[in-house]
Image (spheres, rainbow, N blue to C red):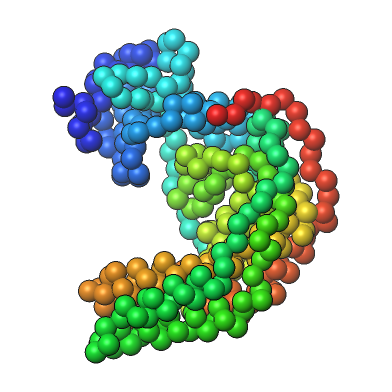
Amino acid sequence: MRDREPDAEPPPRLLRRWELGEARRFVPLPVDGPHRAWRVETGTGRTVLLKRYGQIDRKRVLFQHSVTTALDAAGLPVPAPLPARAGRTLVQAEGRAYAVYPWIEGARRDGLELSLGQCRQLGGLLGRLHAELDRLAPPVQQSLLVPTPRAADAIAAADRLLAALPQDGDDFAALAGRRLRERRELLRELADHQPPEAEAFTVGYIHGGFHARNLLYGRTRQVSAVVGWGGLRVAPFAEDLVRAAVALFAGYGEERGLDLDRVEAFVDGHRAAFPLDAGQICSAVHRLWWEQLCDLGPLRRHYLERRRDRQGPPPADAALVTWWTAHLDRTLEVFAAPYSGAARPEQAGHLDGP
């Protein structure tokens, strides 16, 4: 059937289920994963975003809908799905699952384009999201055992990659070998910096993808929408904060490091909205640095799987690891300094989890 084809348009009459009339025009949006989405001009004159899901866990999607609806009701810039006539936010049509969202105009901005004041406001927004998720989401275990990559495993992986390089290779293969040997030596030198095998963290439901691609800015240069809620999951709040800061503010200068001034403003804004323990923040920074140090995937993809591209400079991920290793103490100071270890807000009024 045509509607089952990956790129087929949805049935024009589908929007009647939301009392929006028939679709007058479908404008496909860039494909992102297994789902499809369209900007739709409806028969009532309203413009909406229509999302068609691929393979889904229905219970999980409905939980995401309930969370984003609650966040929207709390006044946060989170698009909530529109209920259909029957009150459902997830509608089945011809074997497909659909949801409709209000269309929100906005543009994406790189984190390094933001002023320090805007970085502080953005950190405050993530803090407000954490606080509201902590209040609304169901109670979860307040400690989490986080597995740690082993230096020995990463060194063994580097040895395997080095063995896979052609012995009579060109300059590109020689460069690959040099980068891999540099990483192997770093791992040997820093093996005693490996985080504990398990550690307790304060956890809750997090966005899981708070970065430039999931943030839309309106004409006032304020965030008009936080999108991309498919990564909603239980994880340490500190991890979400650190990953967000690294994703937003990496790539600064020729060394491809972190813009620590912007990081400091971002973390300070988060602290004002949702204080976290300084020790957990430092642990999250240490763990993410170690995770990236042990991850040879970027080097493998760049030098072995894409050799035909003949790109000499190291990938951004690898360059960041080198910079971060050289500035680890300063990075820890910047993330932890504003934190006073204040208590978290009390929980109240929970949603049921998936």
Percent x, y of residue 90: 42, 22
Quadrant hosting residue 70:
top right
Residue 78 left/right relative to 180? right
Residue 270 drawn above or below residue 87: below
> Is any atom of residue 313 visible in this view?
no
Quadrant hosting residue 187:
bottom right
Percent x, y of residue 113: 51, 61
At 55% from the left and 29% from the top, the residue drawn is 354
Decide which of 114, 61 is in the foreground and name it. Answer: 61
Percent x, y of residue 221: 54, 48
At 54% from the left and 73% from the top, the residue drawn is 152
Decide which of 296, 250 is in the foreground and name it. Answer: 296
Residue 272 left/right relative to 181? right
> Is any atom of residue 97 visible in this view?
yes
At 31% from the left and 81% from the top, the residue drawn is 165
Percent x, y of residue 336: 74, 63
Residue 341 drawn above or below residue 180: above
